């Protein structure tokens, strides 16, 4: 197992929220950011995300990581639908990263699961239950 630099004294995450959002029509949201880390998991559907000035097409099984203070917004067209799990977390530190960050600023914020996609999906459904 690799050491990612998590020690109990520096890693005491606080879950701020867990909720599902559903969209089934064209939606125009405002570009925004948070002062905490946010993870989104696409349970079903697809859309386009704009994160830190770049465009990403996401679909079922994709994970989106938004470090604190990273601007993001989703764009949903009239022919698209989307169901996503949203989790906000703060109060953690991983070695060699800024407090509350999961990714380096040059890393892609989109994780496209392949090998463990089914298991991760089931875990997310368990969290919701």
Image: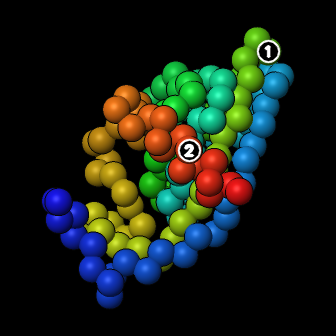
Measured as percent of width and height from the top left, residue 73 is found at 62, 37
Residue at the spot 75% in from the left edge and 43% down from the top edge:
21
| Quadrant including the N terminus | bottom left
Q: Secondary structure at mark 2?
A: helix
Q: Secondary structure at mark 1?
A: loop
Whether 5 is drawn above or below 28: the answer is: below
Q: CA distance from mark 1 to mark 2?
A: 28 Å
Measured as percent of width and height from the top left, residue 78 is found at 79, 15
Residue 33 in sight from this viewpoint:
no
Compare residues 109 and 13 and report the one nearer the observer: 13
Tell which residue pokes out farthest to the left in this image. 2
Measured as percent of width and height from the top left, residue 45 is found at 66, 24
Q: Which residue is mark 2?
A: 122
Q: Which residue is mark 1?
A: 78
10 Å crowding of disc 1: few (<14), some (14-19), many (20+): few
| Quadrant including the C terminus | bottom right
Whether 124 is drawn above or below 84: the answer is: below
Whether 52 is drawn above or below 69: the answer is: above
| Lower position in the chain sequence, tag 1 or tag 2 | 1
Whether 99 is drawn above or below 7: the answer is: above
Which label is found at residue 57? Answer: none
Measured as percent of width and height from the top left, residue 34 is found at 58, 58
Circles 1, 2 touching at the beta carbon (< 8 Å): no
Residue at the spot 52% in from the left edge and 32% down from the top edge:
61
10 Å crowding of disc 2: few (<14), some (14-19), many (20+): few
């Amino acid at each position: 197992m690799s050491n990612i630099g998590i020690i109990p004294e520096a890693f005491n995450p606080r879950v701020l929220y867990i909720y599902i959002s559903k969209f089934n029509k064209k939606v125009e949201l405002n570009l925004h950011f948070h002062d905490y880390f946010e993870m989104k998991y696409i349970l079903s559907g697809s859309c386009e995300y704009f994160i830190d000035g770049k465009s990403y097409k996401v679909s079922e099984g994709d994970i989106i990581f938004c470090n604190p203070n990273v601007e993001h917004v989703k764009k949903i067209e009239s022919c698209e639908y989307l169901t996503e799990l949203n989790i906000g977390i703060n109060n953690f530190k991983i070695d060699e990263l800024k407090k509350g960050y999961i990714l380096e600023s040059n890393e892609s914020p989109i994780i496209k699961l392949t090998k463990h996609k089914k298991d991760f999906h089931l875990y997310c459904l368990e969290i919701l239950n």
